[in-house]
Image (spheres, rainbow, N blue to C red):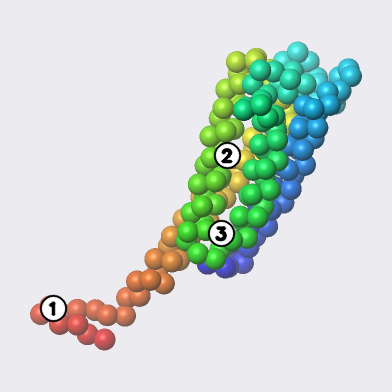
Amino acid sequence: METKSNRRLLWSIVLLSILGFVTSLYLSYRHFFPAIGNTICDISATISCTLVNSSAYSTLLGAPVALFGVVWFIFIGLMSFNSTKDQESASAFFWWNLVGLGFVTYLIIAEILLKTICPLCTVVHVIVLISFILSAVLYKRSKGQFYKEENPSTVTGDINGKEKY
């Protein structure tokens, strides 16, 4: 499954995971050490990272949701390299991305309930969505590639049911 096109997709995912990692790390830092006054991300009452990052929805199981993003992006970066080795790795990569997409859905609902958008969170949401789409493409390609390798069509039958080679 290791093709030039797949390598480009994987490197795109790696670069996106680095950007998502840095963004999530910054949001985690701001959760633990809130800025005094407004940050570059605080534009108004409806566009504010600080409001979202300090809300009731900003923690899950006692940990900042941005910290979950840090961990998620580390795994995405690492998993992307294994996703070309076999169909199981590609499948795990796809499902991990699906988990991330589900988490993003929760975060978007939280922003809707808060009536506030976090621009940096939106960057993370878009990265997760793109990563999911790319992982779906890789997964679909892996299914086709491994199916072809496991089922070569070198044997055919004639009308009497006898095999021909």
CB contact under 8 Å: marks 3 and 2? no
| Image location (x, y in percent) of residue 114 | 65, 15
Q: Which numbered marker is on residue 83?
A: 3
Q: Residues within 10 Å of mark 3 (few under 14, many from 20)?
A: many
Q: Position of residue 105 (x, y in %)?
A: 56, 30
The reply to whether residue 149 is in sight is yes
Residue 100 shows which numbered tag? 2
Residue 65 vs residue 146, the one in the foreground: 65
Would you place residue 163 above or below residue 118 in this image?
below
Expressed as whole percent of the image width and height from the top left, the position of residue 62 reads: 66, 26
107 and 162: which one is in front? 107
Q: Measure how far apart labels 1 and 3 are at the Cα level.
A: 40 Å
Residues at discs 1 and 3 in contact (Cβ within 8 Å): no
Question: Which residue is more in the foreground, 122 or 67?
Answer: 67
Q: Residue at x 56, y 59 (%)?
A: 83
Residue ID for mark 1: 161
User: Residue drawn at (57%, 68%), measured in percent from left and top?
Assistant: 2
Q: First in sequence: mark 1 or mark 2?
A: 2
Q: Position of residue 101 (x, y in %)?
A: 55, 37
* Residue 156, quarter of the rendered image: bottom left
Mark 1 or 2: the one toward you: 2
**Residue at 73% in and 43% down:** 21
Check disc 1: other Cα within 10 Å, few if <14, some if 14-19, many if 20+.
few
Could you tell me which secondary element the residue under label 1 belongs to? loop
Kind of element beneath mark 2: helix
Please report the residue visible at 84 percent of the width from the left and 26 percent of the height from the top.
Answer: 33
**Is residue 26 left or right of 112 when viewed as pictured?**
right
Q: Amino acid at mark 3?
A: Ser
Amino acid found under the numbered disc labelled 1: Gly
